[in-house]
Amino acid sequence: MSSDEMSMNNEPNPSAQMAAGRARRWAARDVIFATCTSRPFDVWNRNSARFPRRSFVFSVQQVVQYSFALAQVHSGMVLLQLDKISHSYGANEILHRITWQIKDDTRTGLIGPNGCGKTTLARIIAGEIAPSSGTITQSGAVSIGYIRQESAAPPGHTVWSYIAGADARLADLRSRLAALEETIARNCQSPADSSPGNVPQDVIAAYGAVHDEYQHMGGYEYDARCASVLSRMGFRAEDYDQPVELLSGGQQSRLTLAALLVRQPDVLVLDEPTNHLDIEATEWLEGFLSSYKGAVIVISHDRVFLDRVVREIVEIERMRLVHYRGNYSAYAAQKEERRQQERKAYELQREMIERTEEFIRRNIAGQKTKQAQGRRKQLEKLERLTPPPFQRSVNLSFVASHRGGNEVIEVRSLSKAYNGLPLFEELSFLVRRGERVGVVGPNGSGKSTLLRMLVGEEEPDGGIIRFGVGVEAGYYDQRREGLDQESRVIDEVWSVKPSLTTEQIRTYLGSFLFTEEEQFRVIGTLSGGEQSRVALAKLVLAQVNLLILDEPTNHLDIPARLALENALDRYDGTLLVVSHDRAFLRRLTTRVIRIQDGAAQVFDMGYRALEAAQAEAREKQAQETVARASATDQAAPRQVVPETSPADKAARLAAYERKRELERRRRQRERRFADIEAEIMDVENRLMEIDDELGNPAHAADWEMLRTLTAERSLTKEKLDSLYEQWAEMERHSSAGLD
């Protein structure tokens, strides 16, 4: 998102801003209701959740347009049409004559190996670059939101001002509303001044138009939406005034993602959105995207994420798009079946060609010359099948130089704090030889800090870290700070084992998919995925018996992730890994340490045990919520007495009477809810009738009627607000079991 799209809203107090704006709006609307000459409609959502609702004011034209738009949404409307799109970088063509319809109900996972053109296609869809050939057709005014892998917010903003200005149109409408409200306030200093002569008609008309558009776009809910998304992205209220240039790279990526999500464009194009998200934020994003009302296109190598979000997989294969129905798991099964069918068809055709060529060779000069010539012509016309493409993958194999002792790492009473805020205190755990230990927790909980302390890059505030006898550790840093950005690939990897010959090191780098040309590139010019492969190549060559890995799957495509998993699965050393890749954790971990709120919790049996515990906790919480909502009282403890005693009989009778009383109160409560809901509906209908009368041009000159209707509207609105408050109070009492 460019900086010119953002509003420079540097209000330090969002709550005060909202309150002031609300006061101006209501003052302006009171005037406009008495003088409006347009015909307003109150559009109510009667199926919404039970809480006081706000009126949405639209013109007749807007209501018709909105209804038409809804009809289009439910019809699976084509938003973008890509027709014969090709793109080249110099002489290197990476996309060839691609055709794709993107509909409003699209939930697509765009996959393929690194370098196949996924990001290029995403940028073409987003309009950032033009294709070398082909056309893109939009269906009307389609808004497209695109987030890159590594994105940063422009300087000069705070966290709140950046996200508050994310929707440039809403920011502009907000400023125009404030200016118009001030104009109205200057012309009408009190309710007694609310006559048509005091407010120019062009101001009233302008305010109505801007207000309708602002409300239609969800302007009054925008601040709450911003706060909700920021919270899910790991930002606290105390972070709102933080300048964006002081945020870490991961925080900036999450902030730009949050700014895109609150805009809610028609088409969301996300390039590796989970790279900097913890598991909790990733799961929230999964839910958000699953219910998103526009099109969603996700470039991701996170298999669990793809399984939970997408309904189709589009793979870039040999510069073209191949479509698969279903999520990633369905794609994997279909892909394997398709590969086997293609292989079988290719082999059958090859056998047929060999038999035909043998027949031609034997009979071209014999008695069956004409038959041989006919078959030769058939072969010449035959469309030859190509063998299924062989997808090269990284060749990984971790080898431990020696076993080492049984106790690999002992951590006792470890503590660490930043700026007086503790990350963790009294952290203790023991890692034994051969274990696969996963470290998980929210962003900022101290996972990466823990690994840096283990390898000596950072000092703890207290506690003991002890390595066992014969332990040799290798460290993979997700920030890749261990790579010399000025060094060439071949020199960087060769430095780990200088005894290798030139031929050996070049062959070794070839197994990590580095071509002869790429081996002599400077590391600083490589992509994130390529630098990750360099770091892994160095780690494999080191032959250590303890691997300490910090987010090793970031920037790796799915084939590379699978290769890494396979290699670690065969590794006979010890593994300690920080990861947010749930598929990776499920397969490899034998134990999981969860760091949260300064404490550590150990889950034996691996990540699946943690998932089971979390699912059980969520189910228990849901049951408790249901129980609290339905229960009206807590039975008093009673003394245990013999079943046949008079006291027992009395207790049974009392329990029966109590049950009858609870049932009676339940029915009474339901009747009260029904009565008040019916009354709310009647009052709402009357309010709409009054607004229709106020907007009737036939009454425009009848000032007495307008005053009467305005007064009635005020009383009706007060009554409606009171009914909402009564309803909310009943709901609170019911949930708390007080009635």
Image (cartoon, rainbow, N blue to C red):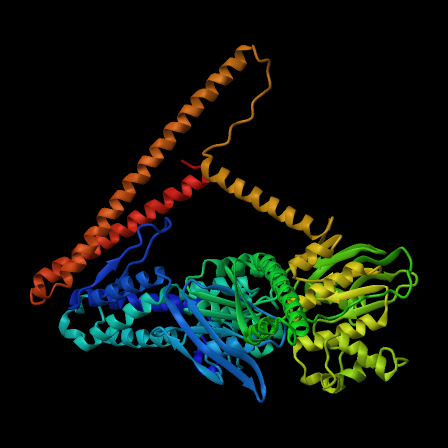
- Closer to the camera, 92 or 215? 92
What is the x, y in percent for residue 325? 51, 59
Residue at screen point 56% across, 61% down: 306
- Residue 420 visible from this viewpoint: no
Residue at screen point 35% across, 62% down: 73
Is 2 left, or right, of 60 in this rendering? Answer: right
Determine whether 628 is above or below 510 in the image. above
What is the x, y in percent for residue 176? 31, 77
Is 236 left, or right, of 200 in this rendering? Answer: right
What is the x, y in percent for residue 357? 65, 72
Is 33 left, or right, of 116 in this rendering? Answer: left
The quadrant of the picture occupied by the C terminus is top left
- Closer to the camera, 336 or 362? 362
Determine whether 413 is above or below 638 in the image. below
- Residue 524 visible from this viewpoint: yes
What is the x, y in percent for residue 630? 45, 36
- Closer to the camera, 709 or 261? 261
Extreme residue in the bottom direction? 90
- Closer to the camera, 376 or 572? 376
Residue at screen point 84% across, 59% down: 572
